[in-house]
Amino acid sequence: MTRHLITSAIPYINGIKHLGNLVGSQLPADLFARYQRARGNEVLFLCATDEHGTPAELAAAKAGKPVDEYCREMHAVQAGIATGFGLSFDHFGRSSSPQNHRLTQHFAGRLAEAGLIREVSEKQVYSNADGRFLPDRYIEGTCPNCGYDKARGDQCENCTKQLDPTDLIEPRSAISGSTDLEVRETKHLYLRQSELRDQLDAWISSKTDWPILTTSIAKKWLNDGDGLQDRGITRDLDWGIPVKKGDQDWLGMEGKVFYVWFDAPIEYIACAAEWAEATGRDDAEWERWWRTDKGADDVRYTQFMGKDNVPFHTLSFPATMIGSGEPWKMVDYIKSFNYLNYDGGQFSTSQGRGVFMDQALEILPADYWRWWLLSHAPESSDSEFTWENFQASVNKDLADVLGNFVSRITKFCRSKFGETVPEGGAYGAQEEALISELSRRLAAYEGFMETMEVRKSAQELRAIWVAGNEYLQSAAPWSTFKEDPETAAMQVRMGLNLIRLYAVLSAPFIPDAAARMLSAMNTLDMSWPSDMAAALNALPAGHAFAVHDVLFAKITDEQREDWATRFSGTRD
């Protein structure tokens, strides 16, 4: 048994996320977590809300609420939506937790002791219209590298180049749009990442199995231009984790907070501490996942994120962990994703463009979205959501291939044999050929799931469904029954056992539908198949089952057109 620590990039608190956010981190992480649990492995799957920084302050102000109250409410909203999508987090934490306060301050103290933090008097952009210093993210302008006109002051999300606000052409406040900006002096702490460049380079180079997308972005930040730069880890804000060295005040840093991108990844660790407290466990229980001196040396740690988060997870967070000099569990594998675009443009939380997670659940059950998003995951390149493709994929894969199989075999059995698995007949050449094909495809499916090749996993799962359909078409028990009822009984028994098999194999992708298939087959047997022939005899003759309603309803042209119109504009 392997122990799997799995984290998904933690979403900002400022509003409900869109489907692009979902498929870029949380959903594939859930797929992997569910699969590893199904294989009998011990899993700790963690996520949280990212609650600090200007985005939280601005969203709270817009909502007319104190920022702590706003964050508390939005955490509950995001947790509820995550439950709606079947995201099986062991804990969904909060970066504003006391645990994250303590750990962030602890890391800062350790880094300071190691000489890896320097104080810098610097000039920072101040907006007269907004009456505040503007964090880098809240200065927008044109990127000097690629010409993108909505580049942020810390990074261009179009070309991923690291920027300073003063690099931007025609800078403006992202809060008010004002160009009445001036530069004022302030003092901040910087993490001396450049001192750790060689260690980080060697560590990244050792990860030969990482996706090209992940390593190419990390190497670009390490080597382009002047190479890895030191990075500010404090901000002039009211809301955040107060700057301290461990539990000691930090002279000269009064009234400042840690930069959200310093404390947010530390929340992965703090989230485990929150999980331990929430479930009545002691500190040793979370430390065995995170400290290699306390049992974490046999843990495999996998992170999931969109490509815009790669630099912080391959460089800044590892620099924090390495620089602390403590035996923290480093990530083993980073699965990064490109962008999911929406109908000819980009999904955008800030601009309210596309389908958002709460809206998606209002119009269709979660499994419809889970299947389409995972089977079209933007792995090797950006992918695009269109309503036409969504309708075609759902109708063909879920309704015609899987749903129709379940409906046909259960209804035929009821009409000829009643609602119990029929007895009689023995496997012939067709059945042996099917068992052989399914054994081969199961091995391929397991291989793709282990390496988290999401689209290939979905393709292989669909091929497993198709194999059952082709068998049913070829065996044609409804014709066989007329001449040879015993053989027809065996064919139907095979079909009913395929439903249970499909439920087990499909559960990581479509957990609700899998549960309904198991319910129809009147079984709680979720054992992963190690022997295909045995798996296809799990439901013996005489076992009762039920015929359920349609597993997946088709999306009509009228629905598709209605939704395309409804989501063509921007969210209020």
Image (tube, grey):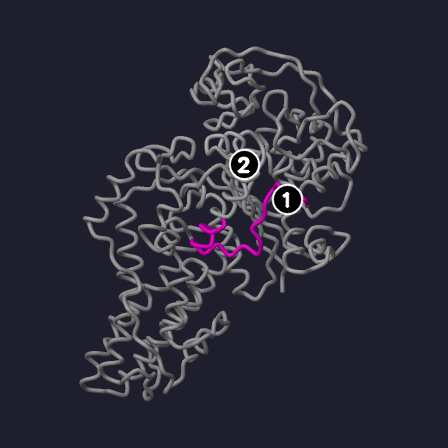
| Residue at numbered disc 1 | 97
Seen in the image, is 251 located left or right of residue 264? Answer: right
| Residue at numbered disc 2 | 309
Quarter location, residue 345: top left
Crowding at dot 1, Cα within 10 Å, few <14 / some 14-19 / many 20+, comes out as some
Q: Nearer the viewer, residue 434 or 102?
A: 102
Q: Nearer the viewer, residue 31 or 449?
A: 31
Quick check: is 435 in the magenta stretch?
no
- Image point (74%, 22%), residue name: 119
- Image point (34%, 54%), residue name: 368
What's the magenta region? Answer: 79-98
Q: Amino acid at mark 2?
A: Asn
Sooner in the amino-acid sequence: mark 2 or mark 1: 1
Q: Are marks 2 and 1 in contact (CB under 8 Å)?
A: no
Q: Amino acid at mark 1?
A: Ser
Crowding at dot 2, Cα within 10 Å, few <14 / some 14-19 / many 20+, comes out as some
Secondary structure type for disc 2: helix
- Image point (42%, 57%), residue name: 509
Which quarter of the image is occupied by the C terminus? top left
Quarter location, residue 167: top right
- Image point (48%, 28%), residue name: 157
Residue 482 lies, with reference to residue 400, above or below; the image says below
